[in-house]
Amino acid sequence: IVDIEWRRRKLTLRIKSEETRVEKEEAEEFAERKRKSKAAKEWDNENAREGRVGGWRDFTKAAQKGGKKQKVAGGYKGP
């Protein structure tokens, strides 16, 4: 009888620890989804988007105006 009770207690402890582990995993997954969702909303924010796009537009305008000039050492240009 004692052996059966001991096994039953061990089994309940094992089941309880497994349930807590699963709950912890679910909470971590929820937190990760929430973090990713928040990051996606921040990325899609119109003000932030305008800043990124505006920066790119400024970069391309500067490249078109100045152009890329190559410096040649010694002043010799090959064929």
Image: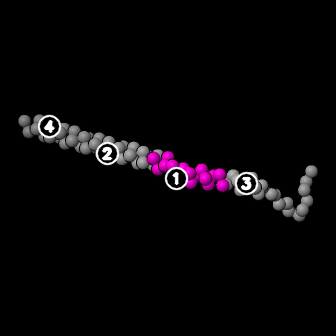
Query: Which residue does the image show at 42% across and 45% down from the upper left?
Result: 37
Instruction: Measure how far apart labels 3 and 4 are at the Cα level.
Output: 75 Å
Give the mark nearest the N terminus, 2 or 1. 2
* Relative to 59, 5 lies left or right: left
Give the mark nearest the N terminus, 4 or 2. 4
Instruction: Assign the N terminus to one quadrant of the image.
Output: top left
The numbered mark at residue 63 is 3
Disc 4 target residue? 8
Instruction: Measure how far apart labels 4 and 2 are at the Cα level.
Output: 29 Å
Q: Mark 3 is on which residue type?
A: Ala
Secondary structure, mark 4, is helix
Disc 2 target residue? 27
Circle nearer the viewer, 3 or 4: 3
User: 72 or 64: which is nearer to us?
Assistant: 64
Q: Residues within 10 Å of mark 3 (few under 14, many from 20)?
A: few
Q: Quadrant of residue 15?
A: top left
